[in-house]
Amino acid sequence: MKEMLRTLARRSFATSRVRNLIAVLAIALTAVLFTSVTTIGLGFMESLTLTMQIQKGSSSDGDFRNMTAEQFEALQQADFVDQAGLRMPVGFLSNTNRHNIEFDVVDQTQADLTFCSPSHGEMPEAANEIVTSDRALIDLGAELKIGAEVTIEFTAHGQEYSLPMVVSGWYEATNEQTSMMIAGTAFLDEYPAIFEYTYDKDAEIAGTYWSDFTATSTVGLQEKMQDFSRDVGGNPEDVAASNYLPAVINTMTNPTADPSLIFMAVVFIVLFIFCGYLLIYNVFDIAVMQEIRRYGLYRTIGMSKRQVKKLINRQALWLSCIGIPIGLIIGFFIGKAALPKVMTFLAVSYTNIVSEVSPSPLIFLGATVLSALTVFLSTRKPVRVAANISPIEAFRYVESNTGKRTSKKSSLGASIPRLAWSNLGRNGRRTFFIMVSLMLCIVLLNCIGTAANSMDIEKEVALMIRSDFAVVNADSTNGQKGFSLREQALSQQTVEDIAAQPGVIDGSLVYKNTLEDTNVTFDWGAEFIEIEQSPNSGLMEGMTANYLFYNLGDDGNPICNVYGMEETAIARMVIEDGETDAHTLYEKMQNGEGVLLGVQVDYQTMQIDKSSDFDFLNVGDVITVYKNGEPVMELPILAKAARNGDDAEIGITANGPLTVGGDGLFLYLPTSIYKELYDEPVAYKYAFNVEESQRESMTAFLNDYMKNVDTSINYLSADSARENAEGTRTMIKFVGGLVGIIFGIAGVLNLINMVITTILTRRHEFATMQSIGMTNRQLTKMMIFEGTYYAAGACLFGLVLATILNLTLVKSIVGSIWYFTFRFTLLPALIVSVVLLVVGAIVPVLALKFFNKGSIVEQLRIAE
Amino acid sequence: MDIVTIHNLKKNFGKGFRLVKALDGIDLSIEKGKFTVIIGASGSGKTTLMNMIGGLYEPTEGTVIVDGINLAELTEEQLTVFRRRKVGFVFQDYNLVPELTIKENILFPLSLDDSRPDEVFFSEIVDLLGLNEKLDAYPYMLSGGGQQCTAIARALITKPAIILADEPTGSFDVKTSQNVAGLLKMTTETFHQTLIMITHNLELAQLADCVVRLQDGRIVE
Ligand SMILES: Nc1ncnc2c1ncn2[C@@H]1O[C@H](COP(=O)(O)OP(=O)(O)OP(=O)(O)O)[C@@H](O)[C@H]1O
Ligand SMILES: [Mg+2]
């Protein structure tokens, strides 16, 4: 006869429609929270892995290089290998412009693992067929179509090749800077000379076998790989060894968990469990209170506590079965929609961000478990209350009321606001929960608003670029290259063409020394404890006791990073120490009286980073300039400037200066002195402002010029940097806003639930009042007052708490991130407060309309 | 044989100046199969006494023994089972479960105990109380008298040791009162059960084998 209990549960379930609706909403909302956060979380990880794999160019578990044919064969047989791809590198093409193209022979497995199998057309079959990216084809000046002809040039084993090839397929480029061009094994058979193995003699890559592979298990993979390398006679460590056989695990595929991400996830989950608790607890608490007599009866006629618990738990289970799936679906789509916004957060560190999330069972499983846990936690107390109700007491039960209630009787004829006031807080815990959720909504939204408002976009932009536009050689914007050679200079013609555009003002060419300028060196007394050849530049490299590395010129002194520029460009820099007036400084420098030293900026303060190891020279220190081994100038440091990305190279890339000067000093000179010093001065950058009205047309001009006239250039504009920075702000607003709004919805749902219950449980009271002459309008008015009191209370506390949190927590968090400048605001809280007050007033009106129908007599009877 | 033995029973509610001595030293024995009526003024302690017999209140002092069981020795769970098996309650306001049909309401206490109904016994009760036609109806479809008959059937179905009826006819007119009380007496007699009934109606008290009069928590007669 267990069915009776089930029947009873089912029928009471069917009759409590309002409660069910609200409970399902509450549970669904909770599930939405969890699903969206797990979707975003897992999607974030999935996307990050994929982004990094694409960036690295491989989704393998690891790779081996420089193998012989026999070693490769052994690898294919190795038991830790699941699938091993074949890659026989030939080398980089030499007839490219702004794009790097590596030409290799690869098989299907390798192509799949390294994101270069054709999305259009077929894998290369014939010896003259190739597949490469759209970007590579454009760069090579070939047509973007299957069957297009393209000439490739490269050098292997000292022999130059120029071969006509045919495009058998292509794929969308995944990397702005580098693409793979692949040929099939037929190419290998056609040109055996290219693939002669000579690595052990001359370290020639062409002829070696490389392989990206997937492992059967990633446990202890690194060791297994190293062991393999040694077993087949390779050396996995020593770069210089003739049998160097690197075995590198793919850290993108096998990342280590980021503790701060895990911490964030835990914070969100706890926050959401709390939010769900606030909601679901109230729903069940109210439901139980309404039916307290019934549970008393059950207990009187012999229902055990366990049976009462079962009865309610079963209904909670059913409600969850409806609510959770609804929440899962909605939550997944919200999460999916939000993911790209979250991913833009990474835009600073990564290019070509993919945002992808598959509806993995893990998401739904995780969200279901968390939602179910929340339902379980929040129904514990109400269930216990119902089970523990002492049988007879339940019959006598009246909503516990405080002493306030007496004032209600005396004020029947008195003012309605006072009447409403006396009804507040009939149930302390419930009132508290409503207030808390509404308050959290206000506080969270205000914190987010403050954070978004405090984002200092101009500061972020200022670190990237100082002028409206900066045109550079494309290599300067290439994270792997950078400006280091004279051939990368801007052409005279290009600069003239740009300068001739309308609206160009404050233009300045920026000259920079290159790796070829080894005859000009600087001495400030640096001492080196070790001197070796640098693998980056090929120059000799000196290391100081502080582990600073300097590239050394012909005479053994550092060559440094030296810039020559016009006064307008110097004036844009942040000069802090010494002669801070740009005009005076420039004149002095022009007279050969000294030099401007650039020191790393502190992102927080945007001033010179005094704590950095690079700030060891003072104003007045003298630097001796040597040319061809002879001292030619004595330049005292006249001033120091806080050097941002733009002062080093452009944006946040600084590969060029690193290659040329190493950690060498950054020295800024007037154009005239610079030209005196260097025999072949070249400009890598043209920085200029443009009148507001002409900026758009300048952007259009540059885009067109870059595409059609001088394909070797690239540019950065303040506007595009600003747009980038805005992306982060949008993300903060979006994610934070979402969380705040969710709490708002929770609060409003709670309020609705409260008002409806009040109306239902007090129908009799209302009817009594109406029977003694209270009009419907007065009743409505009373309820409006009640609703507004809740909202007003929450708003008041919320505003106070928001202010406090703003000035403490938000201020300190925001203060610790460099692109934020704390700006106090209460505007979001005020806006939310107004909305909540309106909602607090509207909800009772609607609830009365729907739930307080029928005549007074009917009402009196229902309540009996 | 006495089915209920009460010795020096006291029950206080509240504390300090709010202290109410609802029962103030009750000694009472009720014989098995007899019909006992409890009368007394409002607030004299009738309901309290009945609830003590039903195991709903813990005594402040004294003992209650029902069917050989000393209620003071039972745990809460055991008391629940005691109520389920040994006591049948009939209330003034019927207290039927609105979601269950008449038949389900009657069988409800059995289902809580996971026991099968005795089909013969069930139809006997239903016949006696005239509920045959209404078994599939819901409580709200029945008259007050009909609903109270259902409550009586529910109290009887577990073959309890005692039936406790707290003003079962309180909300009926004179004629219905007579009918319901008559049915109650008749069925309990038929099944040899002990009935304890509270009433304000002295006419009904005439039907009893024994009348207990309460005044300020004490038996006065
Ligand atoms: N649970 C309780 N808590 C506090 N006081 C109680 C409780 N139950 C009963 N009382 C008090 O004990 C006294 C006896 O109450 P009881 O309900 O037994 O009287 P009664 O004789 O049944 O009255 P009535 O004829 O009105 O039903 C009354 O003063 C009542 O207020
Ligand atoms: Mg009573």
Image (cartoon, grey):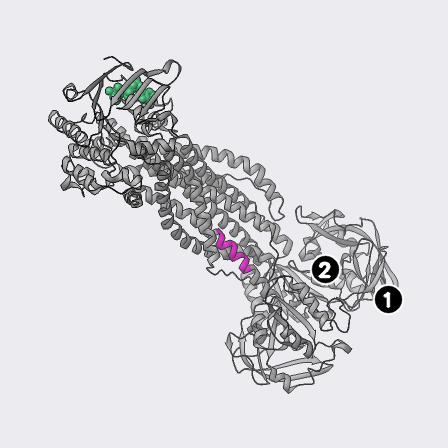
Of A299 and A315, which appears nearest the observer?
Answer: A299
Q: Marks 1 and 2, Cα distance to the nearest angstrom?
A: 23 Å
* Residue bearing mark 1: A628
The quarter of the displayed image where residue A634 is located: bottom right
State whether the magenta stretch is mostly helix, strand or loop: helix
Of A638 and A692, which appears nearest the observer?
Answer: A638
Sequence order check, earlier mark of 1 and 2: 2
Three-letter amino acid code at the position of disc 1: Asn
- Tag of residue A565: 2
- Quadrant in which the C terminus of chain B appears: top left
Q: What stretch is highlighted in magenta?
A: A37-47
Question: Would residue A601 appear left or right of A131 to someone viewing this image?
Answer: right
x and y, in percent, of residue A250 in the image: 63, 64
Of A255 and A836, which appears nearest the observer?
Answer: A255
Q: Given the current orientation, which residue lies at the most extreme right position? A: A630
Three-letter amino acid code at the position of disc 2: Met
Chain of the residue displaying label 1? A
